[in-house]
Every structure is written in structure tokens, then in C-alpha cells.
Image (tube, rainbow, N blue to C red):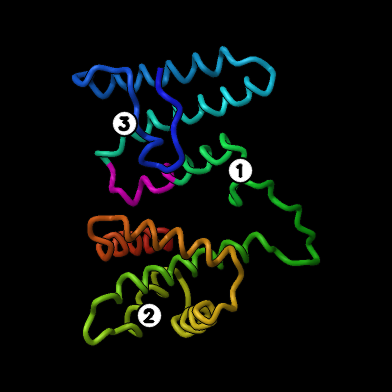
């Protein structure tokens, strides 16, 4: 049986109990079967709830391990984030992104869309910072324009939002989204190429 994971994605995705020469398909089947057995054997009590959450972790770990070498690292970022959130839940912490959504009243406007916009723009700020690092002279204005267009935003509006963000006039969700995106890019072997790939992903969503 796999040991329960520690906090942190690197420890989370370790898996023990299978021979080193097992095929990827065999490992996936064994890990998913283990997750199912853990989930099915859980009772309807607090310990059972903990076991079910652990079963979800084992299943997610199995999928991540199966695809990690076949997809770009930035495309597996959501799996890593979900793993971290599940690990937090297992330890009694509730991630902000998994809190129940607020019921929005029409007269207050669509806050869900506004939150999504702020998150997207914050990720854009992270891409600008990565792409403009170590450039002499730094063509930050051109990079801002390129990122803005990839996000479907007007360059001047994006530049104004970014200035306000850097001045600390945006909310904690935007700051958290910026930190997550920046960390994800900096963890790649080539952060600037990872940012370029993310820009291409955003561009494709506009077509």
C-alpha cells in the first residue's frame, strides 16, 4: 500500500509498492485499483472520510504519473495544483479555490466574471515579468502589448491594470493568481519558453 503523502507535490506524487520494471499501463491499473479499494472500504465516519480523500489523492497521483512524461510540464500544472488542494483538505485546511461559490445577486453585477478577469490579468503580469527578465535593454512595453493581445485585452488597459496591480491596488485573489502563475513558470527548465507556450494557449482560446 502506498504511504500517505506529505505536503508538497514532489512528495505527493511518489508511489511505492510496484516493481521498477512494471509497464506504465500496469502501474496505472494497479494504482487506480488501489484507490478504488481504499474508497470502497471506507466507512461512514470521520476516518472513512479521511480514507476517501486519500483515495482521491491516490487516483490523481496515478493519472499524473502516467501522463507526466507525455505532456508539457506547464500543461500538468492543474494536476499539481489539484494535488496540493487535496493534500490541504486531507490535513484539515480548506484551499481558497475550493471554497463554495458565493451566490451572486444580479444587482451586484457578475462578480464571477470579474474574478476570472482579475485572475487572467494577474497571470498576464507574471508572464510579462518572466519574459522581460534579463533583457538589455528591456522592451517591456512591447512585451506588455504582446501579452495583452494574447489575453484579448487592449494594451493600454492591460498596462494600466498592471500598474495598479504593482502598486498594490488589486485584491488578494489577483495577488495569489500572480504568485501561482509566476511559481509555475519559474519551476520550468526554461521559464521564458514556458511563458511563450502559455501565451500560445491563451491565443488559441481567442480563435
Relative image position of residue 17 (x, y in whole percent): 32, 18
Q: Is residue 198 left or right of residue 121?
A: left
Q: Residue visible at 56% across and 14% down? A: 40
Q: Badge 1 is on which residue? A: 93
- For the N terminus, the quadrant is top left
Q: Nearer the viewer, residue 160 or 170?
A: 170
- Asked if residue 89 is positioned above or below residue 204 in the image, the reply reads above
Determine the CA span between mark 1 and mark 2.
Answer: 39 Å
Mark 1 vs mark 2: give the one in front: 1
Q: Residue visible at 45% across and 65% down? A: 123
Q: Give the magenta-colored segment's residue range.
A: 71-80
Helix, strand or loop at label 1? It is: loop
- Does 75 lie within the magenta span? yes
Residue density around tag 1, few if under 14, some if 14–19, many if 20 or more, within 10 Å:
few
Numbered circles on residues, count: 3
Q: Badge 2 is on which residue? A: 145
Relative image position of residue 62 (x, y in whole percent): 38, 28
Q: Badge 3 is on which residue? A: 66
Determine the CA span between mark 3 and mark 1.
Answer: 28 Å
- Asked if residue 74 is positioned above or below residue 170 in the image, the reply reads above
Residue density around tag 2, few if under 14, some if 14–19, many if 20 or more, within 10 Å:
some
Chain-order first, disc 1 or disc 2: 1
- Does 168 lie within the magenta span? no
Amino acid at each position: 500500500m502506498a504511504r500517505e503523502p506529505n505536503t508538497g507535490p514532489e512528495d505527493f506524487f511518489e508511489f511505492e509498492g510496484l516493481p521498477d520494471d512494471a509497464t506504465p499501463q500496469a502501474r496505472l491499473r494497479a494504482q487506480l485499483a488501489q484507490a478504488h479499494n481504499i474508497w470502497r472500504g471506507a466507512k461512514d465516519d470521520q476516518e472513512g472520510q479521511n480514507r476517501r480523500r486519500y483515495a482521491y489523492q491516490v487516483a490523481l497521483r496515478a493519472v499524473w504519473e502516467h501522463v507526466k512524461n507525455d505532456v508539457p510540464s506547464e500543461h500538468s500544472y492543474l494536476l499539481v495544483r489539484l494535488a496540493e488542494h487535496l493534500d490541504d483538505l486531507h490535513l484539515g485546511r480548506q484551499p481558497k479555490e475550493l471554497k463554495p461559490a458565493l451566490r451572486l445577486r444580479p444587482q451586484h453585477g457578475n462578480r464571477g466574471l470579474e474574478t476570472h478577469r482579475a485572475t487572467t490579468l494577474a497571470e498576464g503580469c507574471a508572464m510579462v515579468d518572466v519574459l522581460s527578465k534579463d533583457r538589455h535593454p528591456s522592451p517591456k512595453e512591447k512585451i506588455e502589448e504582446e501579452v495583452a493581445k494574447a489575453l484579448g485585452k487592449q494594451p493600454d488597459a492591460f498596462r494600466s491594470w498592471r500598474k495598479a496591480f504593482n502598486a498594490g491596488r488589486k485584491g488578494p485573489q489577483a495577488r495569489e493568481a500572480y504568485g501561482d502563475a509566476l511559481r509555475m513558470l519559474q519551476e520550468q527548465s526554461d521559464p521564458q519558453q514556458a511563458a511563450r507556450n502559455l501565451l500560445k494557449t491563451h491565443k488559441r482560446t481567442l480563435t
